[in-house]
Image (tube, grey):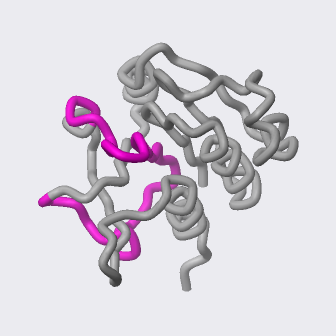
């Protein structure tokens, strides 16, 4: 299993740090693509939540998310965005390929509409309460552990 994590304009450096820790903890994450306004790893605030995980998981900063997607598409890696859309599939019912990229979006605006159009699939985490979404770092944790869960 190989997972590529694409962060589409994540504004909170603390969320980015948390995603690094989860990526290390879940295993199988090949690279984190830090796109647009997403903080590069040299931000001192990032390590407050990453606690050294930036040295455990490869990463690279891209000026735009599209640049990261172009790189993934050139390698024929399927790209799944985590977003609530009309055709999104429940994350627990998806058959994940051996290599996949997941796109996580801006905390308030989600994955950019233009980026969604370039993704192969949209998946969602069902919300059973009154809120419509989870914190992006929590979402990353749930998705990464689902993808790496050993299935019987």
For residue 60, side relative to residue 63 (left or right): right
Would you say 95 lies left or right of 46 here? left
Q: Quadrant of the C terminus?
A: bottom right
Compare residues 7 and 90 and report the one nearer the observer: 7
Looking at the image, is 132 positioned above or below residue 75? below
**Image quadrant containing the N terminus:** bottom right
As displayed, is residue 137 above or below residue 112?
Answer: below
Nearer the observer, 70 or 81: 81
Query: Most extreme residue toward the top, as rendered?
Result: 63
Q: Which residue of the protein is positioned furthest toward the left in this rendering? A: 86
Residue name at image x 60 percent, y 67 percent? 145
Nearer to the camera, 141 or 130: 130
Asked if residue 106 lies in the magenta stretch, the reply is yes
Residue stretch in magenta:
86-115
Q: Give residue 128's quadrant in the image.
A: bottom left
**97 left or right, relative to 34:** left
Question: Quadrant location of residue 83?
Answer: bottom left
Give the x, y percent position of residue 8. 43, 34
Q: Residue sitting at 26 percent across and 66 percent down?
A: 89
Total tally of numbered discs in the picture: 0
Position of residue 120 relative to residue 44, above or below, is below
Residue 50 vertical placement versus 73 (above, below): below
Give the percent coordinates (x, y) of residue 26. Answer: 69, 60
């Amino acid at each position: 299993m190989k997972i590529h994590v694409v962060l589409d304009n994540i504004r909170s450096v603390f969320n980015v740090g948390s995603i690094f820790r989860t990526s290390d903890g879940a295993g199988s994450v090949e690279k984190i693509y830090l796109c647009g306004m997403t903080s590069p790893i040299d931000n001192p605030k990032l390590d407050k939540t990453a606690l050294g995980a930036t040295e455990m998981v490869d990463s690279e900063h891209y000026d735009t998310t599209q640049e990261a997607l172009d790189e993934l598409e050139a390698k024929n890696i399927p790209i799944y965005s985590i977003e609530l859309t009309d055709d999104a599939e429940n994350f627990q019912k998806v058959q994940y390929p051996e290599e996949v990229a997941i796109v996580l979006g801006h905390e308030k605006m989600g994955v950019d509409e233009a980026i969604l159009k370039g993704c192969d699939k949209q998946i969602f985490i069902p919300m059973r309460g009154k809120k419509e979404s989870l914190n992006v770092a929590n979402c990353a944790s749930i998705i990464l552990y689902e993808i790496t869960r050993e299935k019987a």
